[in-house]
């Protein structure tokens, strides 16, 4: 990779920018600083909602970010892309969850609201993985819903997911699933925003570790899987680096001659 050509460098949050202790390594901070100094354009691309991604975005000084697994995209802190859930299909989905006693949380631009309370402990357990608390009960209507979080384990997948072809179901926790439009993903939004900024696909470098990062890694000019990623994710990448606890981001960027 030519170090002189400016890149669009995209980072997942959990398991990538954050170590297993949910903190940012000093080497990662140094790598981000060097990338910025050299004029590369940095993005976060996360399954987290804007509410839960914002502390990391602010801490690390990102100006560009993709949240809700690609449902919303921001360039220079301005929303330039949105892909909301169709209301009729969403109503049917929430009815199915109610019948199956599956808890759900709806995600708007700036907030999360839970719509049921069947198993609060399961919901708390999953939400804690992304640094979140139990969302408040939904008590107001908002025009746009970008994502739904549903709380069920693998045993419930076949009872729900094949019946809703207009949605993609992306598992991020043993008890947690993101639901976004079937046409949406981190990868789709990355390509959309890359086009807005004048980057070609070959100019995109992405880092990830989770199942919701596979398409992003495959779509990028170079996709880097963290050493802590599963084998399935690693097979989707062009490069495998060290883990999120072992300077994985810094070491990969050094190997690519970008820092």
Image: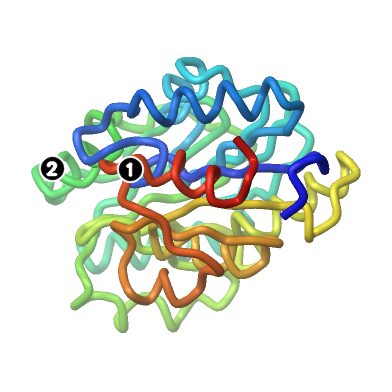
Q: Where is residue 102 in the image (x, y as percent from the top left)?
A: 24, 59
Q: Is residue 105 above or below residue 230?
A: above
Question: Which of label 2 and label 1 is nearer to you?
Answer: 2
Q: Disc 1 designates what residue?
A: 115
Regarding mark 1 in the picture, which secondary structure is present there? loop
C-beta proximity under 8 Å, tags 2 and 1 = no
**Circle 1 crowding by C-alpha within 10 Å: few under 14, some 14–19, many from 20:** some
Q: Where is residue 114 in the image (x, y as percent from the top left)?
A: 32, 39
Near-viewer residue (234 or 53): 234
Near-viewer residue (192 or 2): 2
Residue at image position (9%, 43%) is: 121
Question: What quarter of the picture does the C terminus occupy?
Answer: top right
Residue at image position (52%, 25%) is: 110
Regarding mark 2 in the picture, which secondary structure is present there? helix
Residue at image position (40%, 76%) is: 161
Relative to 181, 118 lies left or right: left
Farthest residue to the left: give it. Answer: 121
Q: Disc 2 designates what residue?
A: 120
Near-viewer residue (35 or 98): 35
Residue at image position (60%, 59%) is: 185
Give the mark nearer the N terminus: 2 vs 1.
1
Q: Distance between the residues labelled 2 and 1?
A: 12 Å
Q: Position of residue 223 (x, y in %)?
A: 58, 61
Rendered image quadrant of residue 135:
top left
Question: What quarter of the picture does the N terminus occupy?
Answer: bottom right
């Amino acid at each position: 990779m030519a170090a002189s050509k400016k890149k669009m460098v995209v980072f997942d949050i959990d398991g990538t920018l954050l170590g297993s202790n949910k903190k940012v390594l000093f080497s990662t901070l140094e790598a981000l600083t060097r990338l910025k100094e050299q004029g590369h354009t940095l993005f976060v691309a996360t399954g987290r909602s804007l509410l839960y991604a914002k502390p990391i975005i602010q801490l690390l000084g990102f100006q560009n970010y993709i949240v809700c697994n690609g449902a919303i995209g921001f360039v220079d802190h301005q929303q330039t892309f949105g892909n909301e859930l169709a209301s009729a299909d969403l109503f049917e989905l929430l009815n199915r969850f109610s019948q199956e006693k599956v808890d759900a949380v709806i995600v708007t631009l700036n907030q999360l609201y839970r719509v049921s309370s069947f198993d609060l402990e399961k919901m708390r357990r999953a939400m804690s993985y992304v640094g979140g608390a139990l969302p408040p009960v939904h008590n107001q209507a908002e025009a746009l819903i970008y994502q739904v979080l549903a709380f069920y384990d693998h045993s419930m997948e076949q009872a729900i997911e094949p019946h809703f072809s207009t949605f993609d179901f992306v598992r991020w926790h043993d008890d947690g699933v993101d639901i976004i439009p079937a046409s949406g993903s981190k990868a789709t939004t990355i390509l959309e925003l890359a086009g807005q900024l004048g980057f070609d696909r070959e100019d995109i470098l992405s880092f990830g570790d989770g199942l919701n990062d596979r398409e992003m890694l495959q779509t990028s000019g170079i996709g880097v899987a963290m050493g802590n990623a599963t084998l399935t994710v690693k097979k989707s990448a062009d490069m495998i680096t060290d883990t999120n606890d072992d300077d994985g981001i810094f070491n990969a960027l050094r190997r690519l001659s970008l820092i």
